[in-house]
Amino acid sequence: MIRSMTAFARKDTRGDWGTLTCEIRTVNHRYLEPSFRLPDAFRELESRFREELRKQGLKRGKVDISMRLQSAESETQSFEISEEMARAVNEAANYINRILDNPAHINALDVLRWPGVMSVPEKDYSTTQEAAVELFAGTVTELMAAREREGERLRPLFDDRLALMSQLVAQVREKMPQLLAAQEQNLKERFAKARVELDPDRLAQEMVMLAQKSDVAEELDRLDAHIGEVTDTLRGDNAVGRRLDFLMQELNREANTLSSKSIDAAVTRAAVDLKVLIEQMREQVQNIE
């Protein structure tokens, strides 16, 4: 199955604690590289989120995860005040004022600012964290579905180009006997124009050298084999991007060799057309997981 590395997913969930939103964006990358922007209360969940990504089958891509928590409007911030600490601070301030020539006035805000007098009670986020874990899993599921849909849209592009490549290879293979025969006739005419006595052995040697130089049967066979391998790879269930990238390199190598051995303009054009099709596929392969 083809999966694109470019996708986006967003989900929300609500509870008594407020609204939680999760967004995930992915783009192409050589490896799996997740980055997180989480509320402080959810920092400890990062390892669980990473495991969820692996569990659902993400293999490659730069993954940006953003999670936001909007507390319920009815929720008010509460404080805890240590009366014992406040009295101690006040008594200490009054004692200092008695021994100073110019005592300074201390007000209630000064006392509240003293460490330990006022504190914010630690909030229990356990329920919200479980909701965050469930929300993240659902968002990743949506992301995977989006990657698969985008990947399937690329399949016709590959199928069409692979079919055209197979046609080009078949056309070159069909032309080769005719091209070699034309080269043999051309060689005979060159001997005749030079008024050189035609030595059958010499002609045979020249034809063997020409055939060896222009023999592209091996390249055509490998092109056919690589085209078949690409087709089979596209049907696989695992991440196929790296293998396809390697196969594009091999296809391009054989197309270049075919061009260098060309003895006819038609073969050269076919090699150029092959390289154009390979490059079009290679550009799309860069975005496949």
Image (tube, rainbow, N blue to C red):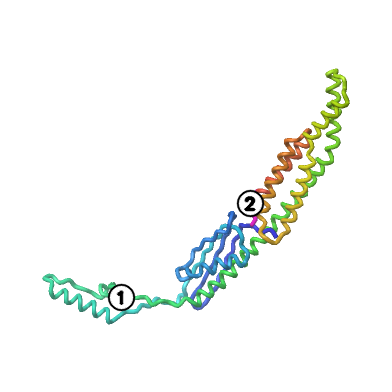
Which residues are drawn in magenta?
A: 283-289
Percent x, y of residue 41: 46, 71
Mark 1 or mark 2: name the one nearer the start of the chain.
1
Find numbered disc 2 in the image and state the secondary structure of the residue it sits on.
loop
Q: Which residue is mark 2?
A: 286
Compared to residue 50, the image places residue 273 above or below, namely: above
Q: How many marks?
A: 2
Where residue 81 is drawn, which disc sits there?
A: none
| Residue 201 vertical placement versus 153 (above, below) | above
Could you say which disc has been placed on residue 116 in the image? Answer: 1
Secondary structure, mark 1, is loop
Q: Where 185 falls versus 44 (above or below)?
A: above
Residue 202, image x, y percentages: 84, 26
Q: Is residue 139 left or right of residue 114?
A: right
User: Residue at horizontal 13%, vertical 75%?
Assistant: 98
Most extreme residue toward the top is 195
